[in-house]
Amino acid sequence: MSINIVLFTLSGLFILLLGANYLIENIVLLAKKTNISQFIITSCTVALGTTIPELTTSLKSILSTPPHPGIAVGNLIGSNIANILLIIGTAAIIYPIKINFEKWVNLEIKINFIIILFPASIIFLNLTQNISFYLSILILISFFYFIFERINSDKDNVNKKQNVDQSTFLIVSKVIISFVALVVGSYYLIDGSIQIAQHFKVSERVIGLSLVAIGTSLPELITAILASIKKIHGIALGNVLGANAYNILGILSLVEIIEPSSILENTKKIDIYFLIISTILLSLFIIKAKKISRLNALLFLFIYILYIYLIY
């Protein structure tokens, strides 16, 4: 393994850090300027930007010749597990996360339920190609419905706009540039990580569930960490909830439509168990505790380390 691969990977991490820092700053400015909550901006738009690595990696894997559905499926399911257990866990250890979006809780719980139901039903019911194909179309439609509901739920926001010297166009432009930095940084980091994993002869499924999943989740991780350091509520959790919906309801359903049976043939029950455990735990903390404490965060990280240990 050459030193160039290591430098290639580290350069990707540096670009990610830079892009995430400017992204957070401009999200806050955009929320103040447009009177749209940070949670909605993050869960609907920033989450889309930070899941571009998952989208491009998954589509590249499934459309290549020969296709690599194991990396595509493992990447998306592994990213969701990492988003909750690793990202929320890390962010909440730095600064406990308060749940300050009560009016969206019911919607987010519904989305989490569908996120679990979609891959779990295919695996546990052993659904055939035809059924999984039509189910995926239904899930993709529900994904667009949920995004519309998220945006629509913020229409009653009555907070006053705050004076921001910069124009909306300039702020949006800087957000887009930050997105580009995240994508470029992710590309370098993911490509380098895959080469390192292949050097050690790790299987496609495990590469997808671990290295690629963590690599493609790095935009969310860096964004969440910096938001926690700056003690900005709504960004870390909004990004994860939004990204998880994009990953499973949006991208995984698309992968299954393109290549039916990808989920059934490239997912083990242990992956679904941990997806269910992590999603239910997050939902319970959102509903009951209204916060994610450092103790909760340690539990998340312990479960994630256990999962990585078991799949290897």
Image (tube, rainbow, N blue to C red):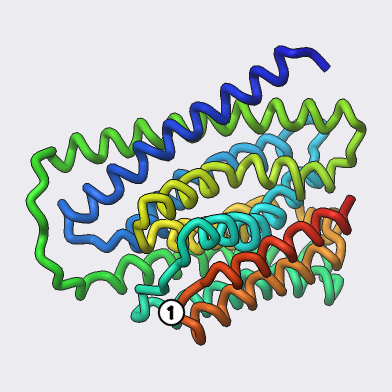
The x and y percentages for residue 261 are: 81, 57
- Please tell me which residue lies in front, 28 or 45: 28
Please identify the quadrant where the N terminus is shown. top right
Residue 207 appears left or right of 219: right
Up the image or down, 75 lies above or below 233; here it is above
Name the secondary structure under disc 1.
Answer: helix
Count of numbered badges drawn on the protein: 1
Q: Quadrant of residue 192?
A: top right
- Please tell me which residue lies in front, 61 or 283: 283
Which residue does the image show at 65% across and 62% down from the upper left?
A: 85
Crowd rating for badge 1 (residues with CA inside 10 Å; few <14, some 14–19, many 20+): some
- Please tell me which residue lies in front, 237 or 267: 237
The residue pinned by badge 1 equals 105
Residue 223 appears left or right of 306: left
Residue 246 seen from this side: no
The x and y percentages for residue 186 are: 57, 33
The x and y percentages for residue 161 are: 11, 59
Up the image or down, 220 lies above or below 157; here it is above
Furthest-bottom residue in view? 288
Residue 84 appears left or right of 124: left
Residue 86 appears left or right of 147: right
- Please tell me which residue lies in front, 275 or 267: 275
Up the image or down, 62 lies above or below 189; here it is below
Which residue does the image show at 74% across and 13% down from the upper left?
A: 3
Residue 195 seen from this side: yes
Which residue does the image show at 43% across and 62% down from the upper left?
A: 238
Q: Quadrant of residue 280?
A: bottom right
The x and y percentages for residue 61 are: 72, 37
Furthest-right residue in view? 201
